[in-house]
């Protein structure tokens, strides 16, 4: 059985793992497809590759399809998020100079308390803080703005945001082009490893269950190739389940470490898989719960409310009509297609397609099609909650 | 066990059980037990510790298939299953559950022995692969722990990679332990302090 070949773009990041594993561990082959994985140099080029049809699907920042639905970021094909690939997994880091200043002012670098870390960063920043993010429409940017604004530093207005591809973040901070960054792993750890920066906070300390990357396709392709897309969704979800299985611990980082994928030592990749980050060149280690999650606790389910939260943040920042933005955003996280792809499989689905974001303090059961599924804690650091758009 | 293979046959129908026994006894030296009632199968199998389990069911559901297979200990011995009818996807489910041979509508006396032989050969091959995989994973795990411990020493003491490894090796020799064990102790201790 020769599979249908699908070309799929990815960025060299740990959270590309579900796509790499789907191909390497045979989950794609089980569905009768083969993934031709194409590594992209930057998020803008990957978005264009997808938009112009050079790839059929892509590892994508969760806000990118939302931005495309809101008509932001130039004229592009409409994109749909048909599955969430990963939850959390970003880190905020600062230059050595800034770290030293913060430490001098008494910050403990506990890698946990978003208030303490944010206030220390703002206090030490002096003039305008220059922060690197991988793309203007990214969970990295949204988390930073949410965090800094809640602490009284209006962002993005009060800071200089620079777009730097993830793998170049360490170089940018070394060259003094930025004072801080928010980036996906392993590139924060690479900055630490190269001795050019220190890690301040995991993204999960700002939002405990942030949809980080999605499986994105062109909306017209999603309509035309339903069967093929179903195979892709299922194989990637099974790969996510494999990644979440403790017995895959040894192999997953070895697969990603290969030159054609991340080309980074497996020891560094293990840190993010295991939520055990080395935050400074001196070797201090910090443990983080839910640092990066794959297919556990309905983590792949594309909740419409997740997209609505992103849409709401973009609307507030860019002065768009909020109800229209929420409606447009909600429609790009295709929980309907995700459900259809899993019909007649044993995968359990929640009954609702939207939920209150930020309302879960401890693992909580909600109704599902065949009983209950457990939702993991999803708090925002400041305790605010986001009500889904029920219209 | 000498050359006698002990076989447990799970078969509710006495006539069919006799057919299997006859075909085995014609073919070679077997020590055969028949279990007519699958309740308590796991206990029987544990008590007899057979070389192979042969299950004959008319038309299993997915649940009975998994239950019977699991009770037969498919990681400890080959399990061969004969069924009269099989729904879509059940052969995949059977193989995933650990069955070494799944034969649909094939219970004829001249076929029993070859199926058993094939089940045993396949089981042994899988067993070898499982052992190799477990060994390889253990070796990889040790290598990873040593790498982590080296990295910790390099950062904490500001030394190079070779020097860090030499330090681990010297400590191991002084304490009469393996390098991997010393590395593991260091990594565990650091985890407690983090």
Image (cartoon, rainbow, N blue to C red):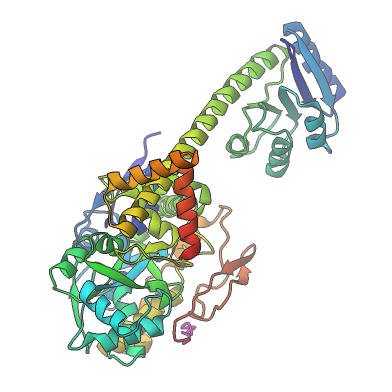
Q: Position of residue B16 (x, y in %)?
A: 81, 21
Q: Position of residue B160 (x, y in %)?
A: 26, 50
Query: In this rendering, is residue B105 above or below A185?
Result: above
Query: In this rendering, is residue A186 above or below A304?
Result: above
Q: Is residue B19 left or right of residue A18?
A: right
Q: Quadrant of the N terminus of chain A?
A: top left
Residue shown at 41% from the left, 48% from the top: A252
Closest to the observer, A312 or B16: A312
Q: Magenta segment, principal secondary structure?
A: loop
Residue A313 shows up from this direction: yes
Q: Locate residue A73: give its quadrant.
A: bottom left
Residue extending furthest toward the bottom: A152
Q: Is residue A387 left or right of residue A3?
A: right
Q: Position of residue A145 (x, y in %)?
A: 30, 83
Q: Locate residue A213: give its quadrant.
A: bottom left
Residue shown at 79% from the left, 15% from the top: B31
**Magenta stretch: includes residue B163:** no
Q: Position of residue A188 (x, y in %)?
A: 29, 65
Residue A22 shows up from this direction: no
**Magenta highlight range:** A384-391
**Magenta stretch: includes residue A386:** yes
Numbered disc total = 0
Query: In this rendering, is residue A79 above or below A312?
Result: above
Closest to the observer, A361 or A390: A361
Residue shown at 30% from the left, 62% from the top: A189
């Amino acid at each position: 059985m020769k599979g249908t070949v699908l070309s799929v773009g990815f960025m060299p990041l740990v959270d590309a793992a579900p796509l790499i594993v789907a191909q390497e561990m045979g989950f794609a082959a089980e569905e009768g497809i083969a993934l031709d994985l194409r590594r992209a140099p930057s998020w803008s080029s990957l978005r264009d590759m997808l938009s112009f049809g050079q790839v059929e699907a892509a590892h994508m920042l969760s806000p990118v399809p939302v931005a495309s639905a809101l008509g932001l970021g130039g004229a592009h094909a409409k994109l749909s998020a048909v599955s969430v690939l990963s939850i959390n997994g970003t880190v905020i880091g600062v230059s050595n100079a800034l770290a030293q200043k913060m430490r001098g002012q008494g910050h403990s670098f506990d890698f946990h308390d978003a208030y303490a870390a944010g206030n220390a960063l703002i206090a030490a920043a002096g003039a305008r803080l220059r922060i690197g993010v991988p793309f203007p429409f990214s969970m990295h940017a949204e988390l930073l703005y949410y965090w800094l604004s809640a602490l009284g530093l209006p962002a993005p207005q009060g800071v200089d945001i620079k777009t730097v591809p993830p793998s170049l973040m360490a170089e940018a901070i070394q060259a003094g082009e930025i004072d801080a960054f928010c980036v996906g792993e392993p590139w924060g750890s690479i900055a630490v490893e190269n001795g050019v920066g220190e890690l301040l906070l995991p993204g999960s300390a700002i939002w405990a269950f942030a949809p980080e990357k999605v499986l994105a396709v062109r909306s017209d392709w999603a309509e035309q190739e339903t069967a093929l897309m179903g195979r892709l969704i299922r194989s990637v979800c099974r790969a996510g389940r494999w990644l979440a299985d403790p017995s895959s611990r040894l192999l997953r980082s070895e697969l990603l470490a290969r030159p054609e994928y991340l080309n980074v030592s497996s020891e560094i990749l293990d840190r993010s898989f295991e939520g055990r980050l080395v935050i400074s060149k001196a070797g201090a280690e910090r443990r983080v719960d839910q640092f990066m999650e794959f297919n556990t606790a309905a983590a792949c389910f594309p909740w419409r409310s997740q997209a609505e939260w992103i849409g709401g943040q973009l609307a507030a920042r860019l002065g768009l009509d909020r109800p229209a933005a929420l409606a447009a955003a909600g429609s790009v996280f295709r929980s309907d297609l995700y459900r259809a792809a899993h019909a007649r499989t044993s995968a359990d689905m929640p009954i609702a397609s939207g939920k209150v974001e930020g309302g879960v303090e401890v693992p909580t059961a909600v109704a599902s099609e065949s009983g209950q599924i457990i939702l993991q804690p999803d708090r925002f650091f400041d305790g605010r909650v986001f009500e889904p758009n029920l219209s | 066990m000498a050359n006698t293979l002990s076989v447990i046959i799970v078969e509710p129908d006495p006539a069919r059980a006799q057919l299997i026994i006859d075909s085995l006894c014609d073919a070679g030296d077997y020590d055969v037990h028949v279990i007519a009632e699958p309740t308590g199968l796991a206990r029987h199998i544990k008590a007899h510790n057979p070389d192979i389990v042969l299950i004959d069911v008319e038309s299993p559901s997915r649940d009975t298939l998994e239950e019977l297979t699991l009770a037969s200990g498919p990681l400890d011995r080959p399990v061969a299953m004969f069924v009269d009818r099989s729904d879509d996807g059940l052969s995949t489910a059977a193989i995933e559950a650990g069955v070494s041979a799944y034969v649909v509508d094939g219970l004829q006396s001249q076929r029993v022995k070859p199926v058993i032989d094939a089940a045993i050969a396949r089981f042994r091959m899988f067993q070898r692969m499982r052992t190799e995989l477990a060994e390889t994973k253990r070796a990889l795990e040790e290598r990873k722990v040593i790498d982590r411990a080296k990295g910790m020493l390099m950062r904490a003491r500001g030394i190079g990679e070779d020097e860090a490894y030499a330090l681990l090796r010297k400590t191991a020799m002084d304490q009469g332990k393996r390098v991997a064990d010393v590395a593991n102790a260091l990594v565990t201790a650091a985890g407690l302090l983090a």
